Amino acid sequence: MDLLKRKITDEGVIVSDDVLKLDALLNHQVDPQLTMEMGKEFASLFREEGVTKVVTVESSGIAVAFATAYELGVPLVFARRKKTLLADADSLSERVPSFTKGIVTDIIISRQFLSKEDRVLFIDDIIANGDAARGLIKIVERSGASLVGVGVVVEKCFQNGASSIREQGIRLESLAKITSLANGKITFADERA
Ligand code: 5GP
């Protein structure tokens, strides 16, 4: 998506060779027009898959997952980050390390919102090492629902999350592929370094 790549180039802030701050469009502020365009793009990529639910993880995935769910005409379920130590038999949970916060959190989805009949599309903001995606995929598997694929706004190709998920045979589509943040420059997959 050219519009997205332009916005990333103009408003992304390189924090290190590994981390790109995208607060202006994904992680703090939301651009509604761009977000709805991204939802349309994901919806068109996965329209033939018979999606019954879009799933994401709070909080940064919610806006684009909402736009996708809206385009597909299905509900959005967001996994919550658990803040209690109480076990809950009605919920499915997985422990995932957070790439940016350096802490471990539990993500949970109530069994009520995922069933064996569901065909689930997982949408998220950024994929790095893939821990959040792997946790969410395990929750979907344990619910008995079928995962039709994963859509991420930004794939950092120099980290192995996306490739490890594709190696599991899961379809993963990204709207912008970043191959490098080295030398203070954001390089996209379809550009020369
Ligand atoms: P993963 O679990 O794939 O290692 O990391 C995914 C999560 O960490 C994303 O949902 C995103 O919020 C956060 N994250 C990973 N890398 C970056 C980055 O370079 N910039 C920002 N802003 N967030 C990131």
Image (tube, rainbow, N blue to C red):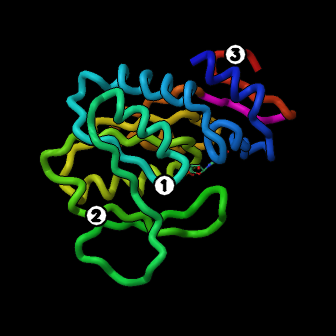
Q: Secondary structure at mark 3?
A: loop
Disc 3 to disc 1, C-alpha distance: 32 Å
Q: Residues within 10 Å of mark 1 (few under 14, many from 20)?
A: some
- Type of secondary structure dominating the magenta stretch: strand
Q: Which quadrant of the view contains residue 31?
A: top right
The quadrant the N terminus occupies is top right
Is 88 on the left or on the right of 157, as rendered?
Answer: left
Residue for badge 2? 110
The residue depicted at 82 percent of the width and 29 percent of the height is 185
Residue for badge 1? 58
Q: Is mark 1 within 8 Å of ligand 1?
A: no
Q: Earlier in the sequence, mark 3 or mark 1?
A: 1
Does residue 80 sit above or below 175 in this rendering? below
Does residue 139 sit above or below 49 in this rendering? below
Residues rendered magenta in the picture: 177-182
Q: Which quadrant of the view contains residue 99?
A: bottom right
The residue depicted at 76 percent of the width and 32 percent of the height is 11
Q: Is residue 166 visible?
A: no
Residue for badge 3? 191
Q: Is there CB contact under 8 Å for labels 3 and 1?
A: no
Disc 2 to disc 1, C-alpha distance: 14 Å
